[in-house]
Image (cartoon, rainbow, N blue to C red):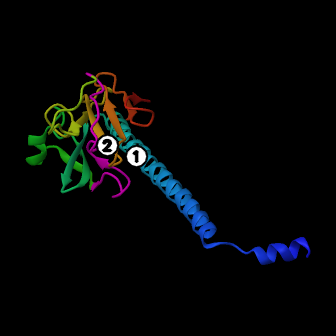
Amino acid sequence: MTPVAMMRQRGVSLLEVVVVLAIAGLFLTISSFAMQSVRRRTGLRAAAGGVRHLLMKANSSSVSRGSHCGVRFFNVGDQWFYSVYEDGNGNGIYSEEIKRGIDKLIEGPKPLFEPGSAQVGFPPSGIVDPDTNRPFPAGARPVQFGQSNLCSFSYYGACTPGTIYLTDGVSAAAMVRCSGAGGRIRIRFYGLSGKTWSN
């Protein structure tokens, strides 16, 4: 009997088929989890970059207009939005003056980013405060510009110091931080390489 004929006679047992299918299923599951993680982290990076771009645009607008501009963040349920305002009386942007129509709406309201890309907030697993290295207390606000959700930029380059926290909804986070006097806007990430903040 030739080797080819012997191979044809041998066949494949049910156990061998089950083992091969189990191994293939395991690889598919692992690769699916890996792809979901990559997609979430890519969405988080894109969302953080979009928020930074929005703030930098408001900063540039305040310089080119020669007046204060401010970005106000607000949510309706789980969806976050932003509006951009221009100072109407030369004293900066204030929530009360927005309500009274003194500081004028120049853009928005618009969604902060596409649903599903990231969320404003903290991951369910929790994160540490980048300044104290201690866990955030329950009920901490994810948008922190003093006691409000309003980041104001002056025509001479300063801005309201504060931070917006974003999450991928699982374990990673990003923060977009305005430094204040220098007007610097930077992004840092949490959970991309261990339970620490990194650039």
Q: Residue at x 16, y 43 (%)?
A: 103
Q: Quadrant of residue 95?
A: top left
Q: Which residues are magenta?
A: 110-132
- Is 127 in the magenta? yes
Residue 44 numbered mark, or none = 1
Q: Is residue 128 above or below residue 13?
A: above
Residue drawn at (37%, 27%) of the image? 184
Q: Determine whether 80 is above or below 55 in the image.
A: below
Magenta segment, prevailing SS (helix, strand or loop): loop
Residue carrying label 2: 166
Q: Amino acid at mark 2?
A: Leu
- Give coordinates of residue 50: x percent, y percent: 39, 46
Residue 174 left/right relative to 97: right
Q: Residue at x 44, y 46 (%)?
A: 41
- Measuring from the top left, give residue 61's x and y in whole percent: 34, 39
Please, which residue is most extreme toward the front here? Answer: 1
Q: Quadrant of residue 96?
A: top left
